[in-house]
């Protein structure tokens, strides 16, 4: 049994070496797991804190867009009314000029006919 003794001590040494490496590896993995878990927790907290801020911002932008759209619609309506008023004013001016010219021609004709009589 003596000749087997060196083999068993070598085997025990290899196993102890593997055990030591496994313990170190396990410790490293636990540390990485703890760090990853911490980072994930911080990310989750950030997202939970940020969500209401983003939601409020989106609601404010939606409201601002609705106000802008309403303002644009009102401005377009006002513009349409002003264009129509301008067109009517041009037509009234053209009619007034035509009436004036008619009156001038009529007055001149009346004046000439008085001079002839």
Image: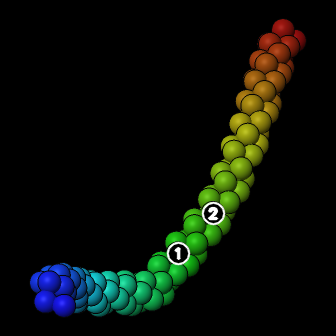
Q: Residue 34 appears at what percent x and percent y?
A: 29, 90
In percent of width and height, residue 95 lies at: 79, 33
Left or right, residue 88 beside residue 62: right
> Eyeballing the image, is 45 above or below 108?
below
- The answer to whether residue 87 shows anywhere in this view is yes
Disc number lying in front (2 or 1): 1
Q: Marks 2 and 1: CB-CB under 8 Å? A: no
Instruction: Name the image quarter holding residue 46.
Output: bottom left
- Give the residue displayed 18% in from the left and 85% down from the top: 4
Image point (75%, 24%), residue name: 101
The image shows residue 31 at horizontal and vertical percentages of 24, 88
Q: Is residue 60 left or right of residue 12?
A: right
Q: Quick one: 43 or 1, which is closer to the camera?
A: 1
- The CA distance from mark 2 to mark 1 is 16 Å
- In the displayed structure image, the side of residue 109 where residue 42 appears, left or right: left
Q: Is residue 74 above or below residue 108?
A: below
Query: Based on the displayed image, in which of its 4 quarters is residue 93 positioned?
Result: top right
10 Å neighbourhood of mark 2: few (<14), some, or many (≥20)?
A: few
37 to the left or right of 19: right
Residue beneath label 1, please? 58
Q: Which mark is residue 69?
A: 2
Residue under the point 83% across and 16% down: 109
**Dot 1: what SS?**
helix
Which comes before the other along the chain, label 2 or label 1?
A: 1
Indicate the position of residue 116 as horizontal and vertical percent values: 84, 8
Q: Nearer the viewer, residue 34 or 48?
A: 34
How many marks the image carries: the answer is 2
- Kindly indicate the quadrant of the structure image that contains residue 26: bottom left
Asked whether 109 or 19 is in front, the reply is 19
The secondary structure type at the circle numbered 2 is helix
Where's the C terminus, which quadrant? top right
* Of residues 116 and 61, the one drawn nearer to the viewer in this rendering: 61
């Amino acid at each position: 049994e003596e000749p087997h003794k060196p083999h068993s001590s070598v085997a025990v040494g290899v196993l102890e070496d593997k055990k030591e490496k496994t313990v170190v590896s396990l410790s490293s993995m636990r540390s990485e797991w703890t760090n990853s878990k911490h980072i994930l927790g911080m990310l989750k907290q950030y997202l939970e804190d940020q969500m209401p801020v983003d939601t409020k911002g989106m609601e404010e932008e939606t409201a601002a867009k609705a106000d802008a759209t309403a303002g644009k619609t009102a401005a377009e309506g006002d513009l349409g009314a002003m264009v129509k008023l301008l067109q009517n004013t041009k037509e009234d001016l053209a009619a007034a000029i035509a009436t004036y010219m008619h009156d001038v021609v009529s007055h001149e004709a009346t004046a000439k006919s008085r001079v002839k009589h």
